[in-house]
Amino acid sequence: VQLQASGGGLAQTGGSLRLSCAALGGTFSINAMGWFRQAPGKEREFVAAVNWITGSTNYAEAVKGRFTISRDKAKNTVYLQMNSLKPEDTAVYYCAAGPSDTRYDKWGQGTQVTVSS
């Protein structure tokens, strides 16, 4: 399984972007997919995750109420809808997949999100 992320770019404060991550090769070994991000000079941090089977979600406090993670099982794709963007959301965003939401063993290539003030 390979993860292919897309949808990053430049947005203004208060704007929106949607990220996509396609699981190429199927999702037979995946029970959770998530998004992480890494800002310059900072460690990678968790953003959001979705249980592939049940659809249940969880979010980092910093993005609750602004970001929405969802999945399309027919397309083997997970999305991250990002609204009310802030400059501190600027980072490289990575999608991840794995057997549980505490163990990710597949990573996408990362997509840059830049929010201007």
Image (tube, helix red, strand yellow):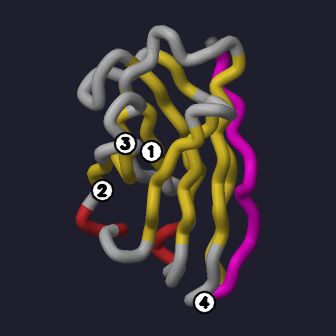
For residue 25, say whether it is visible.
yes
User: Would you call the spot at circle 3 few (<14 residues within 10 Å), some (14-19), or many (20 or more)?
Assistant: some
User: Would you call the spot at circle 2 few (<14 residues within 10 Å), some (14-19), or many (20 or more)?
Assistant: some
User: Helix, strand or loop at disc 2?
Assistant: strand
Compute the Cα span from label 3 to label 4: 34 Å
The quadrant in which the C terminus is found is bottom right
Residue drawn 51% across the image and 83% down it: 84
Mark 3 vs mark 1: in front: 3
Compute the Cα span from label 3 to label 1: 18 Å
Mark 1 vs mark 2: in front: 2
User: Helix, strand or loop at disc 1?
Assistant: strand
Horizontally, residue 55 falls left or right of residue 97, namely: left
Residue 3 picture location, percent across and down:
64, 26
Residue 28 lies in the magenta stretch: no
Residue, disc 2: 59
Q: Amino acid at mark 3?
A: Gly
Q: Amino acid at mark 2?
A: Tyr
The quarter holding residue 22 reads: top right
Residue, disc 4: 117
The mark that comes first in sequence, 3 or 4, is 3
Residue, disc 3: 55
- What residue range appears in magenta? 2-12
Compute the Cα span from label 1 to label 2: 10 Å
Q: Amino acid at mark 4?
A: Ser
User: Would you call the spot at circle 1 few (<14 residues within 10 Å), some (14-19), or many (20 or more)?
Assistant: some
Report the front residue among 38 and 84: 84
Compute the Cα span from label 4 to label 2: 24 Å
